[in-house]
């Protein structure tokens, strides 16, 4: 047995036995519902069910909107996470609580909030309509906004935790050496964020991919326009249970593939 295998054996034996029963129960809570879907599904019809026109349109729309909402989450969430982690201004703690609201609010409530903000009678919606002549609700843009609303906090939490865990000593050293704030951010803060940024991007994309409540409330369910894969599952559940189960399994497969392939190895605790 080589030294590496010995270290791995020692590390594996470090887990107290008392943790295994609840860990197995937790794993079962996640895995067994998926097994239930597999048992209920008609695997012989699976290819035909997931390749229907409506299913492919929903999958394409989900991937596009989830990608766009993830980009929006990065562009908006990275600055917000830095402000929350590094700012010493009064009220930051309250601001942090507000930012985390989408994590605890029912998604339907978030959809209603967006509707009354950007809807036809919302104060911001009236302004958008006056300037562009267009309405935001029940459009593909509304899907992206709803997904960003629920997914961005996952990115912010990941990045803020990483910044707080790393401390600010490197940034203070750079500042004492004469680096300007923007230079400190680019050369010191941003590299510290990269591992957590990869994790946050994966979590945000996966959350956006599975978003349902805020989307159906704010964007509706129009095929080819706002009907994402979760909404297609809901629609098919009312008319064809086998199709709904097949699409649910497809959604699970896509989410697992995204997390397994895109999640950085360093975040899994793997050391080469």
Image: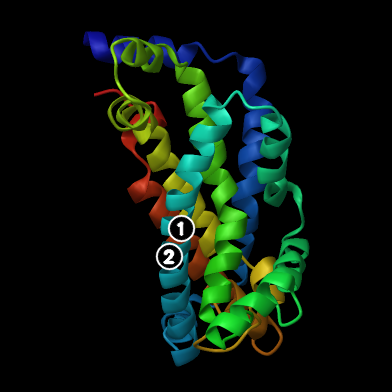
Secondary structure of residue under mark 1: helix
Residue drawn at x 48%, y 72% is 62
Residue 219 visible in the snapshot: yes
- In this picture, residue 257 sits left or right of residue 88: left
As drawn, which residue projects farthest toward the left?
2
CA separation, marks 1 and 2?
6 Å
Whether residue 141 is situated above or below residue 102 in the rendered picture:
below
Instruction: Residue 101: give x, y in percent of width and height.
Output: 72, 47
Secondary structure of residue under mark 2: helix
Instruction: Residue 268: give x, y in percent of width and height.
Output: 40, 32
The residue to which callout 2 is attached is 68
Q: 92 or 201, which is in the foreground?
A: 92
Labels 1 and 2 touching (C-beta < 8 A): yes
Residue drawn at x 32%, y 15% is 174
Whether residue 95 is situated above or below residue 35 in the rendered picture:
above
Classify 10 Å Cα crowding around label 2: few (below 14), some (14-19), many (20 and above): many
Classify 10 Å Cα crowding around label 1: few (below 14), some (14-19), many (20 and above): some
């Amino acid at each position: 047995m080589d030294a590496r295998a010995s270290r791995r054996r020692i590390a594996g034996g470090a887990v107290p036995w008392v943790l295994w029963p609840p860990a197995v129960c937790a794993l079962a809570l996640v895995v067994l519902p998926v097994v239930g879907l597999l048992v209920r599904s008609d695997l012989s019809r699976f290819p035909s069910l997931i390749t229907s026109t409506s299913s492919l349109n929903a999958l394409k729309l989900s991937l596009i909107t989830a990608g766009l909402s993830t980009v929006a989450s990065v562009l908006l969430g990275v600055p917000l996470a830095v402000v929350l982690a590094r700012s010493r201004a009064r009220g930051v703690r309250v601001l942090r609580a507000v930012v985390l609201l989408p994590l605890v609010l029912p998604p339907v409530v978030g959809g209603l909030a967006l509707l009354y903000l950007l809807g036809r009678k919302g104060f911001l919606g009236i302004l958008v309509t006056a300037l562009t002549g267009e309405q935001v609700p029940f459009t593909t843009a509304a899907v992206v906004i709803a997904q960003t609303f629920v997914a961005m906090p996952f990115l912010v939490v990941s990045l803020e935790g990483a910044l707080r865990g790393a401390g600010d000593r490197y940034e203070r050293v750079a500042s004492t050496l004469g680096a300007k704030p923007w230079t400190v951010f680019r050369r010191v803060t941003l590299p510290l964020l990269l591992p957590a940024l990869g994790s946050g991007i994966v979590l945000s994309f996966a959350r956006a991919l599975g978003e349902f409540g805020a989307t159906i409330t704010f964007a509706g369910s129009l095929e080819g326009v706002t009907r994402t894969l979760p909404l297609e599952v809901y629609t098919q559940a009312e008319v064809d249970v086998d199709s709904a189960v097949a699409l649910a399994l497809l959604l699970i497969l896509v989410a697992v593939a995204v997390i397994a392939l895109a999640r950085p190895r360093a975040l899994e605790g793997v050391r080469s």
